[in-house]
Image (spheres, helix red, strand yellow):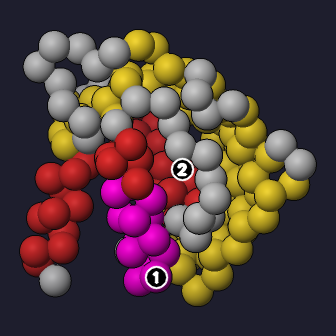
Amino acid sequence: MSNGGRRVAAAAIAAVLAAVAATAGAQDLPTRRPGLWEITMQQPNAGSQVVRQCIDETTDRQMQQLGQGIARENCSKNAWRRDGERYVSESECRIGSTTAVSRSVFGGDFAKSYRGEVVSRFDPPLAGMSQTKTTIAARWVGACPGGWKPGDMEMAGMGRMNVNELGARVRAVK
């Protein structure tokens, strides 16, 4: 993977972590429709990354619980509020030796699609970046493909992994 590709992947992962941490305490977030979701994360001057994710109701809830655990352990601030049809959050979290201060705004029906923006500042810089602005657009594609199970997630250059199994491994290590 090229340096540019690594930067996009690192920024995409940081954006996902920021979004997960930001919404971790949001008990009344709408649940996403079960099936395959295609999530496109785009950053100015860095390109885009597409994540395909197979979910069911249990997996969506488990991802929120995983996010709550990440937030409890790594975030000194994790506040969110509903603002009309949007969800707004602000967080301050540790990613390794870096502090990430993020503000996220998400909206949509969560059954067919949702869209959001995550603006994060990193101190010291993360993967050479001191600030990112990531636009996240997610759409429900349909049923999960054959051979996929709830929790399967696929990202270019990283292959397919199962977030449920990853969460179980993280809990087992503790």
The CA distance from mark 1 to mark 2 is 18 Å
Q: Among all residues in the image, which is located at the extreme right?
A: 84
Screen quadrant of the C terminus: bottom left
Q: Give the residue at mark 1.
A: 72
Q: Looking at this view, is 98 or 60 the one in front?
A: 60
**Which residue matches tag 2?**
15
Compared across the picture, whether 83 is left or right of 128 comes to: right
Q: Residue at x 46, y 37 (%)?
A: 8
Q: Is residue 65 left or right of residue 163?
A: right
**Is residue 68 covered in magenta?**
yes
- Secondary structure of residue under mark 1: helix
Q: Is residue 34 left or right of residue 165?
A: right
User: Do residues under tags 1 and 2 come within 8 Å of each other at their CB atoms?
Assistant: no
Residue 155, x across and y down, in percent: 31, 30
Residue 117 locus on image (x, y percent): 71, 43
> For the magenta stretch, what is the residue range?
62-74
Residue 44 makes an appearance in the image: no
Mark 2 surroundings: few (<14), some (14-19) or many (≥20) residues within 10 A:
many
Q: Amino acid at mark 2?
A: Ala
Which residue is at a point 47% across and 43% down the rendered structure image? 12
Q: Residue at x 53, y 43 (%)?
A: 31
Numbered disc 2: secondary structure:
helix
Q: Is residue 104 left or right of residue 50?
A: right
Q: Is residue 114 above or below residue 99?
A: above
Q: Quadrant of residue 116?
A: top right
